[in-house]
Image (cartoon, rainbow, N blue to C red):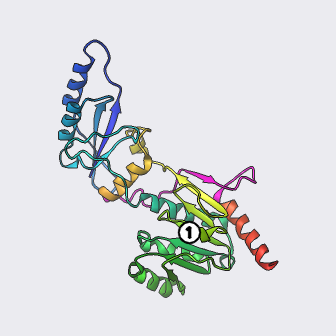
Amino acid sequence: MFVVLRVISPPKGIFAKSKMKKAVMNSVIQTVSTENGLPFYMLDVPEGMSRSMWEAAEKKCGRYASRIVVSRSIPLPDVGKLQRFVPCSMNSALTFNTAVEALKNADIPPDSISITLSDYGARQASELCRILPFASLVRVITAYPERYALPCEKAFREFGASVVIRSCYEPPTKPDIIICCDGRLSPHAEKAAVFSHKSKTFGALHFKGTGTLLSNSHSEVIPESIDSVDFTGAVTELCGGSEYKKSVFREIDVSCKRCETVTPAKCLNCYALQGQFAIRNS
């Protein structure tokens, strides 16, 4: 569970400071439900609070003061246990889900490409089988191969697929699509197509995702100024909710600008076809 701080406009006038203090003291914690997890809380606070006002807000947040979701533009002061929550795995899940959706829509012959899942923290181990239908060669780069033992066994038993586990990236002979869930991009991936939540560093083709969509009930109460990844990550990681586990990025920046209509699926298809042509003529 966590607390969303909804920042509202401060009162104006000659007694503005007094009114602000009163607004903080009278603000009531609201409970908001999630689809199938624990609820979270919301607290309205005026913009431009003093330290004493933040101290009052921290007390209202109680045991969840160290789990605060608030606009990234609002700095949290060093008051009590007050601390901003930063999700650990939401960007990883969004990167994986976005890549899977693009691969579904691209309709590339599986024997023409390879897929490399870069997942050093093994956060997407349980999702491994979702990418097996899209490539004849699937590799995983991870620092925790033991966490991939059961998923690899399932992949072989149910799909007849032998997943290759590696500790670092090595370019394959086929056009390679890297699902970079951990944000670590290798300089050896210069010829690959890369899905990531970080800015481009390597890759012939790069898909950088940002933001995600909220459910109707949550979008009605969560301010647009709050990072949607922060919020959905909190619902998933702190409330145990599953409503955002299959979410994708709301916006995807594609590095290729050749086509008038740029979509990840079309770019992947073009990348795979060009790669096969290059291999046949090499």
| Outermost residue toward the front in this view | 187
Residue in the image at 71% along x and 70% along y: 272
Question: 54 left or right of 98?
Answer: left
Please say if 79 is above or below 39.
Answer: above
Question: Residue flagged by tag 1: what amino acid is it?
Answer: Ser
Q: From which residue to which does the magenta span run? A: 240-264
Image quadrant in which the C terminus is located: bottom right
Tell me if residue 215 can be seen: no
Residue in the image at 46% along x and 62% along y: 92
Q: Does the magenta stretch include residue 243?
A: yes
Q: Mark 1 sits on what residue? A: 186
How packed is label 1: few (under 14 Cα within 10 Å), some, or many (20 or more)? Answer: some
Tell me if residue 135 can be seen: yes
Where residue 21 appears, as percent x and y from the top left, is 21, 25
Where residue 221 appears, as percent x and y from the top left, is 37, 39
| Outermost residue toward the right in this view | 281
Where residue 40 appears, as percent x and y from the top left, is 28, 48
Question: 263 left or right of 208?
Answer: right
Q: Which of the 4 image quarters holds residue 145?
A: bottom left
Type of secondary structure dominating the magenta stretch: loop
Please say if 71 is above or below 156.
Answer: above
